[in-house]
Amino acid sequence: VDIKYSFPITGRLYPSHYSLLYYCKGEKPKTFHPDRLPLEICSNCYRELRDYGGYKHKLNPKGINLTDVWYDISPVRHQRYKQRKGANELPLKTLDRIIEMASNKGDLVFDPFGGSGTTYIVAEIKSRNWIGIEIGPIDDILNRFNHVDEERKYLQQIRENYNCLFSNQTLTSRIKQGLWTPESVRNKLEKIKNTQEKPLTIQAELDFS
């Protein structure tokens, strides 16, 4: 997981990521359904950061495949945002992605290092059974369960931007600016098809904004 803007450590290379180890029993995992992510977009002009040229019509409308390096998750750094003082807390977004990818509703999630309880909160919200262990005080973890509806709402907002090529906000802004959208690409392809042009000329005439 990429962690941009981390603090430098004297005598060591600048830390810019932390690793998640993924193990499975057998050659293939029993459960594996990763989310798809939207295209990376400039937050100012809403244009895509990568030029897909004449291949826009081949993009999956459900989004881009998840890679083994995650750039879209910011670490929980400032103490004011941490649920437990001194804990090496992982964001809800990280545990949501892991649990969604590697388990189904009703499956058992086990975390022997409770920390701030993020794993347990996400497992509870996503209807997984869970077992947790924490050697230290658990008051902060219990307190999080008293406000689980707030965290549930936050996760719902996160998941609204998954499994689509553009988020609703980005899609609205792109339409206003006359930029291509999955629907405009489909409409243009349909228009070309209806004109009964030769297949060899279709690719050349795909001129998307």
Image: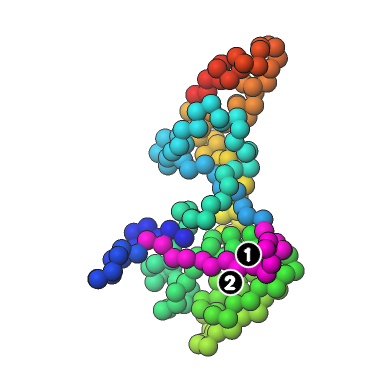
Q: Is residue 43 visible?
A: yes
**Residue 29, percent from left and from top:** 68, 63
**Disc 2 designates what residue?**
119
Q: Main secondary structure of the magenta part?
A: loop
The magenta region covers 16-32
What's the distance in space between the residues labelled 2 and 1, CA to CA? 9 Å
Question: Mark 1 packing: few (<14 Cα in 10 Å), some, or many (20+)?
Answer: many
Q: Residue at x 64, y 67 (%)?
A: 24
**Residue 174, percent from left and from top:** 51, 32
**Disc 1 designates what residue?**
99
Secondary structure under tag 1 reads: helix
Q: Residue flagged by tag 2: what amino acid is it?
A: Thr
**Residue 107, percent from left and from top:** 72, 70
From the viewer's side, name the closer residue of 4 and 198.
198
- Which color scheme does this rendered protein use? rainbow
Question: In the rendered structure, are the residues bearing label 2 and label 1 in contact, judged by CB atoms less than 8 Å apart?
Answer: yes
Q: Is residue 94 above or below residue 120?
A: above
Q: Quadrant of residue 147?
A: bottom right
Q: Is residue 174 above or below residue 40?
A: above
Q: Residue flagged by tag 1: what amino acid is it?
A: Ile
